[in-house]
Amino acid sequence: MPTARFGQWLYLLDDGGLVYSESQNRFVGLDMAGVLAYRAFDKGSNPDDLHGFGRAISDTKKLNMQIIFGLSRGQFPDTKADDRLKIAQLDLKQKGVFTVHHLPILFAATDGIDTELCRDCFKSCPSAMESARFHLQILNIESCLAICVNGQEMLRVPNSEQVGLGLLHVVRSLLYNEVDYDVAFHAAMIGDGRYALMLCAPRESGKSTLAAYLTGHNYSFITDEPALLRLDTTCIAPVEMPISLKEGSWVSLKDEWPQLAVAPIHRRSDGRRLKFLHPPKDSVASASQRLTHILFPKYSPSSPPQIKAVSTMQKFALLNEGGMLFNRQFSKNKFEQFLELICATPAFSITYSSFQEAEQLVHNVLSRRSVTESVNEPAGC
């Protein structure tokens, strides 16, 4: 339904509604009371003004994109001749050219910088067969390490323990800015040959750990932050990025992934320690996979295993809570394709207290059975 404000539409769902702003390239979700209030006061309101109209349950502005997605988009110029000259004049150490989701990237560091943690980001990436389009440099600047892209400083970290994670953020930002996708989810993706499941949850929820465990138990790994969706194919592409695992996961995954015992340790700015897991090629999907299920996992050591079907509005609220980003070329038509896909895709929340329970719950989701209750299909649009 068009609204009084140009480029803004209201979509009515079974248990609420969504207002999409094409100019702001985002949407806000409202419960039924909010929908009624919005329609009553429809005078061209901006989505930012909707908070007084009932309960806004999925406002993308609440997400801190600087944290979830790294750097903002639109900051990466192509390599110019003067940039290439500057790069050639640097005293570079252990440089190499890698391909990350079809992007040829050159990584290099000035002499005196330990590149072990830097190169740990690229262990899953094939060598590029073409000239690098983006040059990532690590430089010593004012007692800090600066990460530059094509001669432009993007990020500074105080020490080498944080440089690997800094590189990971910058590479993800390159993906959001440069590759072909419609929606980028802060989610992990696994498959079993027939089905492809997106594990979506906020940071610190353990979805990467669960993806790593399932990859070690007959599932193929597709991606771990970001999950890049193409709406024309409803597929999510594999991305050659490692699985980031916090310290609490290392021991619990030692049987599935013994290589974690000797993996380099990265440190976040808050002091938390992480390791990167690089699943072997025979455990990684070789092609894009069609999205068939969405799971919202929750680890709860004191709760019984449980599966719950997720309603239409809950899907959008939980996807927003987990984090997602529309491509800059998004439009009303794209949003309606996205709306139809999410409405039609079965979605469930699962609660588990062990990996074994989680694996059984995932199996039950795919076979449409529940451990504790019968599962009804979520309502559609």
Image (cartoon, rainbow, N blue to C red):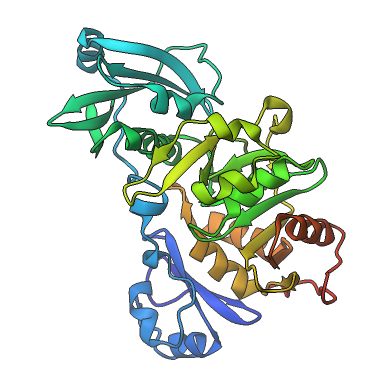
Residue at the (23%, 17%) spot, across then down: 83
The image shows residue 240, relative to residue 40, as above or below, that is above
Residue at the (74%, 44%) spot, across then down: 191
Q: Residue 177: name its quadrant.
A: top left
Residue 109 image point, x, y percent: 30, 19
Q: Is residue 62 left or right of residue 299?
A: left
Residue 6 image point, x, y percent: 38, 68
Q: Residue 110: name its quadrant.
A: top left
Whether residue 21 can be seen here:
no
Quadrant of the image for the C terminus?
bottom right
Residue 283 image point, x, y percent: 72, 32
Whether residue 200 can be seen here:
yes
Residue at the (55%, 63%) spot, across then down: 319
Residue 244 image point, x, y percent: 51, 42
Residue at the (44%, 76%) spot, across then down: 3
The image shows residue 325, relative to residue 20, as above or below, that is above
The image shows residue 115, relative to residue 19, as above or below, that is above
188 or 60, which lies in front? 188
